[in-house]
């Protein structure tokens, strides 16, 4: 289908550019697809290894129009403009074709690599079949988007009531989220497992360390 919803899960970043001379950076991420913009929380004093584990849903995207995603990492400042750490760009046609993907996207600043950001994608195409005036497929009862039997296909369990179940179990989730000892899964939001990084706060044993 040419339209659907894209779920973007921003896990964290490993940054090589540091905008602070003294102290640690307070990073946050800005995710942009066309005119749609989402922003993570600010991770105070997270420095070069922020962890967000935040999910955003971009609704009613058109595969022929919304072809790229841009992710900016910035350092929050209180007395001056926020400093740009790096920007990542990714072709969404790969996501539309694969449905579910995990990627570590390179960040660049003035043409040089400044780190990477870890992201998971879940593409949920709209269904065109209407039955009894209600959209069937990824929509829940009454045409409402949900996370149950009419919600994520093979995704989150629970009621189709526009929210995650407090004790929901993940079925397929993001398929390779934990491959290589990477980022964990979020507790209390339909995910099961340990919050944040696997291993020592990062990718296995030598990834996003706590240095």
Image (cartoon, rainbow, N blue to C red):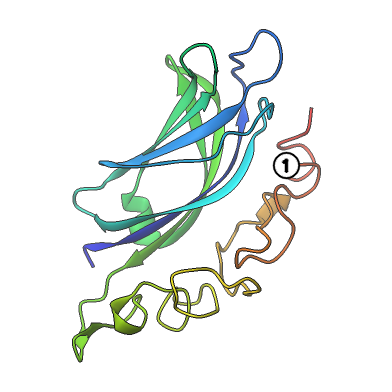
Residue that sits furthest to the top in the current view: 21
Q: Residue at x 43, y 70 (%)?
A: 162
Quadrant hosting residue 33: top left
The residue where tag 1 is placed is 202
Quadrant hosting residue 118: top right
Q: Residue at x 55, y 39 (%)?
A: 41
Give whichever of 200, 54 is nearer the camera. 54
Q: Residue at x 31, y 51 (%)?
A: 93
x, y (%) of residue 154? Answer: 50, 77
| Numbered circles on residues, count | 1
x, y (%) of residue 88? Answer: 43, 32
Give whichever of 100, 211 is nearer the camera. 211
Quadrant hosting residue 1: bottom left
x, y (%) of residue 89? Answer: 39, 35
Residue that sits furthest to the bottom in the current view: 132
- Residue 185 lies, with reference to residue 108, above or below; the image says below
- Image check: 108 left or right of 196? left
**Circle 1 crowding by C-alpha within 10 Å: few under 14, some 14–19, many from 20:** many
Q: Residue at x 54, y 79 (%)?
A: 158
- Residue 160 lies, with reference to residue 24, above or below; the image says below
Give whichever of 103, 41 is nearer the camera. 41
- Image check: 194 left or right of 65? right
């Amino acid at each position: 289908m040419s339209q659907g919803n894209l779920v973007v899960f921003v896990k964290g970043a490993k940054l090589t550019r540091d905008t602070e001379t003294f102290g640690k950076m307070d990073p946050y991420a800005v995710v942009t697809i066309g005119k749609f913009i989402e922003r993570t929380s600010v991770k105070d004093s997270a420095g070069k290894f922020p962890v967000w584990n935040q999910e955003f849903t971009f609704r009613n995207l058109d595969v022929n129009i919304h072809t790229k995603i841009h992710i900016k990492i910035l350092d929050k400042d209180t007395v001056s403009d926020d400093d740009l750490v790096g920007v990542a760009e990714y072709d969404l046609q790969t996501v539309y074709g694969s449905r579910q993907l995990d990627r570590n996207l390179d960040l660049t600043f003035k043409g040089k690599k400044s780190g990477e950001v870890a992201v998971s994608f879940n593409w949920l195409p709209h269904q065109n079949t209407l039955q009894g005036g209600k959209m069937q497929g990824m929509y829940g009862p009454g045409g409402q988007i949900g996370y149950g039997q009419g919600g994520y296909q093979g995704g989150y369990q629970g009621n189709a009531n526009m929210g995650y179940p407090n004790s929901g179990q993940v079925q397929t989730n993001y398929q390779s989220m934990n491959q290589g000892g990477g980022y964990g899964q979020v507790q209390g939001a339909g995910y099961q497992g340990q919050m944040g990084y696997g291993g020592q706060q990062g990718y296995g044993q030598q990834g996003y360390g706590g240095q």
